[in-house]
Image: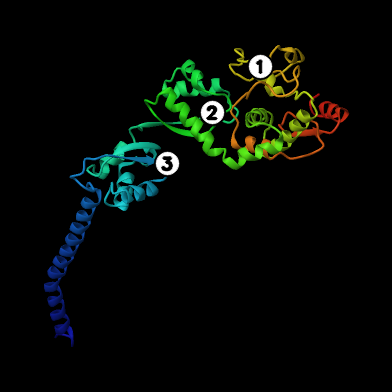
Amino acid sequence: MIAPGANSAAQHLMKSNKSYPFRLLLFLIVTVVIATGAWAWWRDAINSADSSQTTSKIFVVRRGEGVKSIAARLASDGLIRSPTGFYLLVKMMGIERSLQAGDYRLNAGMDAGAIAKEMTHGTLDVWVTTLEGWRVEEVAAKLSKELDIPESEFAKVAREGYMFPDTYLFPKDATVGAVARLFFSTFDAKVDEKMRADVKKTGLTFDEALTLASIVEREGRTEEDRPMIAGILLNRLKADWPLQADATLQYALGYQSSGKTWWKKELYDEDKTVKSPYNTYLHKGLPPGPIANPGIISIKAVIYPKTSDYWYYIHDPKGVVHYGRTLEEHNRNIAKYLQ
């Protein structure tokens, strides 16, 4: 005996079984359509932006720039079709950390993969960083290493104090003249006309202020110290006192082969007798010219110094500066912090 409703349940099951192949087919069709659409999008996204384009343009990848930013700018410049596609492609290729900062010659006829690979093969130009307080010889050594420019050739065109410390992007085949001009133009751009005009308030010429700034660069340690030290050195100049700046001795002593450095780390009393116009222990006033290439903070420190009644300063072993109003106070600081 068949239970009530059993026949209708069996009929429903039979209908359900008959509709299953249809639902499966529908699912497969939808999946194929989606997959086909996704594949079409992907193929379009990573294809060249303009296959007929052969004219190249320079594209610069900034230091520390992420893939998303690079992709967005590539798309904005018309070099790729899709920033999302480029981003995903770089991830899939596993080269996200291999993209190098610098400039590249790219064109819209390159597909996204070719552009991504190009950015891992080195750049047309070379990033070169020179530091505040380096003397010309140190800048020359850096350029020789990075650009294969002979140090002696750079020394002929360089000017101490004006080789503005910064991070530069130089062509690999840059001439020594082109490199020097970029240093000079950067200096002129950083030291504006107002700063040059305000130098007059110090009683110094611009060249004299730059010379003092180079000393402040080497004597100071922090952004807070340098205006105070500049003020002390200006006090000494106006009072016709010797500057007695150790950095000028280091410059006069020159290269130290034992320490492989241009700046002797420990100075002794006999060093103060070195015969040189840069020895500010023996000679009053400023040395003949800058002793290094100062950064903008030190240049501003001289133009806008902090006035005080201090005449002396020392740095303790931790680099903390201690000021003195009198020679007695200065000697107490020496006894307390340096002996």
Where residue 165 sits: x, y (%)?
A: 54, 32
Query: Which amino acid, mark 2?
Result: Met
Q: Quadrant of residue 177?
A: top left
Q: Is residue 180 left or right of residue 124?
A: right
Q: Nearer the viewer, residue 71 or 313?
A: 313
Q: Is residue 40 left or right of residue 219?
A: left
Q: Residue at x 25, y 44 (%)?
A: 108
Q: Which mark is residue 62?
A: 3
Query: Which amino acid, mark 1?
Result: Ala
Q: What is the C-alpha distance between the residues marked 2 and 1? A: 19 Å
**Label 3 residue SS:** loop
Q: Nearer the viewer, residue 34 or 68?
A: 68
Query: Which amino acid, mark 3?
Result: Arg
Q: Residue at x 33, y 33 (%)?
A: 121
Q: Nearer the viewer, mark 3 or mark 1?
A: 1
Q: Is residue 188 above or below residue 277?
A: below
Residue 212 appears anywhere in the view: yes
For the N terminus, which image quadrant? bottom left
Q: Nearer the viewer, residue 242 or 113?
A: 242
Q: Residue at x 13, y 66 (%)?
A: 25
Mark closest to the chain's N terminus, 2 or 1: 2
**Label 1 residue SS:** helix
How dense is the environment of label 2, judged by Cα within 10 Å: few (below 14), some, or many (20 and up)?
A: many
Q: Nearer the viewer, residue 197 or 128?
A: 197
Q: Residue at x 39, y 36 (%)?
A: 102
Which residue is tagged 2?
163
Q: Nearer the viewer, mark 3 or mark 2?
A: 2
Which residue is tagged 1?
252
Residue 119 appears anywhere in the view: no
Where residue 104 sits: x, y (%)?
A: 33, 37
